Image (cartoon, helix red, strand yellow):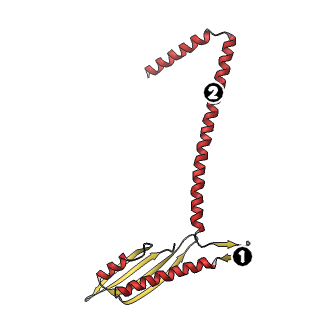
């Protein structure tokens, strides 16, 4: 701290010595130059601030544009006027087809592992922003066939609950699967 005060005092003494030797004309010129230098320093700092702000806003705009592109890939709803709502039925058929394909895929996997007493119940839940399907699956098989089924499931299907009950030599398996359609 003392070193800093000493340095500032030396700078002040040096500037006082220089300014006291100046004539009034040189003094006015030094004031004008210092004002111009100060003005350009303020101008440069505000310019760099707004430049950084512009870069930040461009990055934000780019991220929002990518989000909009992903949302545009979802089923679209077209508004003709304020009173009517039209669905794009082609995209709705694609979702329904994907759902049926997924169920057929699961049924084929169950048939390939030779599961018995198969029971499938599906429900779909929808809110303002998100739709997901819940699949309750009950069948009788063995542990190895369960592992094969779980490994061959689609990556979008998540296991919510799994219940295993052993009855004699058979294993009763209850799975609760959750998935969305991309």
Query: What's the CA distance linking mark 2 and mark 1?
Result: 62 Å
Q: Residue furthest bottom?
A: 117
Give the camera-side residue of 171 and 91.
91
Q: Residue furthest left?
A: 169
Disc 2 is placed on an element classified as helix
Disc 1 is placed on an element classified as loop
Instruction: Give the residue drawn at x 66%, y 25%.
Output: 36
Give the camera-side residue of 164 and 15.
15
- Kindly check if marks 2 and 1 are in contact, taking CB atoms under 8 A apart as contact: no
Residue ID for mark 1: 84
Please report whichever mark, 2 or 1, sits nearer to the chain's N-terminal start: 2
Residue ID for mark 2: 38
Few, some or many residues within 10 Å of mark 1 (<14, 14–19, 20+): few
Q: Which mark, residue 105?
A: none
- Where is residue 147 drawn, in percent x and y? 32, 78
Instruction: Give the residue drawn at x 60%, y 73%.
Output: 75
């Amino acid at each position: 701290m003392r070193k800093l005060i000493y340095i500032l005092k030396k700078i002040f003494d040096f500037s006082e010595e220089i300014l006291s030797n100046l004539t009034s004309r040189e003094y006015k010129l030094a004031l004008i130059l210092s004002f111009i230098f100060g003005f350009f320093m303020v101008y440069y700092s505000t310019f760099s601030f707004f430049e950084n702000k512009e870069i930040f806003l461009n990055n934000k705009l780019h991220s929002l544009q990518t989000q909009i592109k992903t949302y545009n890939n979802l089923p679209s709803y077209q508004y003709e006027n304020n009173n009517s709502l039209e669905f794009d039925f082609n995209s709705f058929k694609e979702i329904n087809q994907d759902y049926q394909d997924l169920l057929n895929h699961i049924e084929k996997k169950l048939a390939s592992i030779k599961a018995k007493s198969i029971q499938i119940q599906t429900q779909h839940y929808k809110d303002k922003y998100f739709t997901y399907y819940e699949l309750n699956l009950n069948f009788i098989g063995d542990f190895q066939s369960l592992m094969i089924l779980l490994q061959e499931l689609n990556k979008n299907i998540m296991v919510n609950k799994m219940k295993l009950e052993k009855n004699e030599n058979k294993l009763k398996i209850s799975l609760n699967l959750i998935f969305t359609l991309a």
